[in-house]
């Protein structure tokens, strides 16, 4: 008699199915035949969402397992019980991703199943090698996010005025191998609106989404200059700020305010203007605070004189920022007392390639969480009395970025 209750197992599959109008759903086909469809979205929105997943707690648990589990205290004679305990702990970690990253959770299930089927080769280090492989598998979602963040950094940062083609060409120049993987020309010729693609890994899924992203021009990925987050502008106009609320303030509102600070920091003519203003104000204070018999060697500066200079400088500054005055014309107009030695002050040039940019461009695996230690102690020999200084990972990162940071980070903390 035939067994009618025989269980049929299916091959797990990670699919990307189009549902029309450039929208897609990630489909998880489980081993038991059940199918899970994630919410419909666009490739651009899903790429941004994937780049923003917070793996902080998951990272810490993997690090704890690697550094503290007794399995790694031994080198040759590894107790099987330690390995079994390690595997039990390792298999609990993917559950941390079930809600925040269902795709990563699904993909880890497949990868861990394969890793656990590895046969003992009889070597003395087999158990240690098998444990290291499990850790490598567990880090797959984190690695993919690192790659994705670096791709976004190289492709879209500072490219708000560029076309989709120009963005793709830049990606191909920086990461040629990635460019081949996400070339929109490599997509099948299936009729748009009913296409289904199979991804063989999380990274493969992100490359598919990038290819589909570059195949359209209705949406573009941009970086908010205030919070530094990625977003999709609502119009085709150049958009500098997203709609997020950061630290209780709209990015658009604070971004516009701090952008003025950035312009003044980087513009030579505006720096001269600020220096003149400080000089005039200091002159006013000295004149007003001095007794009549102490003013002999001071330059006169009454309140009405200072107010007149300030109003003239304000109007000239507005015209300069609107492009109605050159830097030289602007400085000549505000230097009413002939304080400046020269009126040559060009507008600031864009920031060049920082050490940070070079690291990311040179290595797609560059991970700031690993590259910079939590703290480092250095002896400052430049001081008359050398002393030890403690630098955090953020301090080291900012130093390598050399000012290429969000407006929030540069100006928001004050």
Image (cartoon, rainbow, N blue to C red):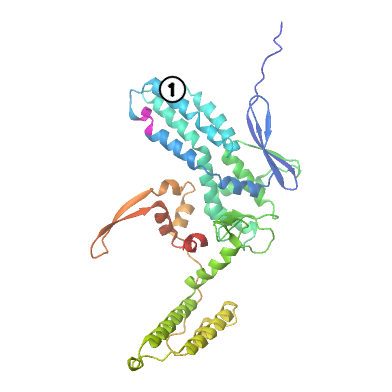
Q: Position of residue 362 (x, y in %)?
A: 46, 52
Q: Is residue 193 above or below residue 66?
A: below
For image coordinates 43% across by 29% down, the residue present is: 131
Provide the residue designation for mark 1.
Answer: 84
Residue 364: in magenta span: no
Side (left or right) of 127 relative to 27: left
Residue 70: in magenta span: yes
Q: Quadrant of the N terminus?
A: top right
Q: Residue furthest top?
A: 1
Image quadrant assignment for residue 316: bottom right
Q: Is residue 394 above or below residue 205?
A: below
Q: Is residue 252 above or below residue 331?
A: above
Image quadrant assignment for residue 293: bottom left
Q: Position of residue 213 (x, y in %)?
A: 65, 50
Stretch of the chain drawn in magenta:
68-72
Q: Position of residue 18 (x, y in %)?
A: 72, 42
Of 360 and 298, nearer the camera is 298
Side (left or right) of 343 relative to 51: left
For image coordinates 68% across by 45% down, the residue present is: 41
Of 3 and 82, nearer the camera is 82
Q: Overall secondary structure of the magenta stretch?
A: helix
Residue 320 seen anywhere in this rendered image of the structure:
yes
């Amino acid at each position: 008699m035939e067994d009618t209750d025989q269980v049929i197992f299916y091959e797990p599959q990670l699919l990307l199915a189009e549902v029309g109008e450039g929208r897609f759903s990630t489909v998880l086909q489980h081993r038991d035949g059940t199918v899970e469809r994630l919410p419909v979205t666009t490739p651009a929105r899903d790429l941004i969402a994937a780049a923003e997943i917070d793996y902080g707690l998951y990272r810490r648990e993997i690090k704890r397992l690697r550094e503290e589990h007794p399995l790694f205290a031994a080198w040759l004679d590894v107790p099987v019980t330690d390995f079994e305990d390690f595997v039990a702990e390792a298999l609990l970690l993917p559950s941390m991703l079930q809600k925040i990253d269902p795709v990563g959770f699904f993909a880890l299930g497949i990868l861990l199943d394969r890793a656990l089927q590895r046969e003992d080769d009889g070597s003395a280090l087999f158990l240690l090698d098998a444990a290291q492989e499990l850790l490598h598998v567990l880090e797959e979602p984190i690695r993919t996010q690192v790659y994705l963040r670096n791709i976004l950094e190289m492709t879209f940062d500072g490219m708000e005025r560029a076309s989709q083609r120009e963005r793709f060409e830049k990606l191909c120049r920086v990461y040629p191998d990635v460019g081949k993987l996400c070339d929109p020309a490599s997509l099948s010729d299936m009729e748009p609106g009913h296409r289904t693609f199979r991804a063989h890994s999380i990274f493969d899924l992100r490359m598919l989404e990038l290819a589909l992203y570059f195949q359209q021009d209705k949406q573009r990925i941009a970086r908010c200059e205030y919070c530094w987050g990625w977003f999709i502008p609502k119009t085709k106009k150049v958009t500098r700020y997203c709609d997020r609320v950061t630290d209780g303030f709209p990015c658009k509102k604070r971004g516009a305010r701090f952008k003025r600070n950035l312009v003044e920091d980087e513009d030579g003519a505006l720096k001269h203007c600020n220096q003149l203003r400080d000089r005039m104000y200091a002159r006013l204070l000295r004149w007003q605070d001095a007794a009549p018999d102490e003013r002999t060697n001071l330059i006169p500066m009454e309140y009405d004189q200072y107010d007149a200079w300030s109003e003239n400088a304000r109007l000239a500054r507005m015209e300069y920022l609107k492009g109605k005055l050159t830097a030289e014309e602007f400085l000549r107009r505000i230097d009413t007392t002939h304080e400046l030695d020269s009126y040559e002050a060009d507008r600031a040039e864009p920031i060049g390639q920082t050490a940070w940019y070079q690291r990311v461009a040179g290595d797609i695996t560059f991970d700031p969480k690993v590259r910079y230690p939590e703290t480092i102690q250095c002896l400052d020999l430049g001081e008359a009395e050398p002393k030890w200084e403690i630098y955090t990972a953020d301090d080291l990162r900012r130093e390598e970025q050399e000012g290429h940071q969000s407006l929030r980070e540069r100006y928001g903390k004050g």
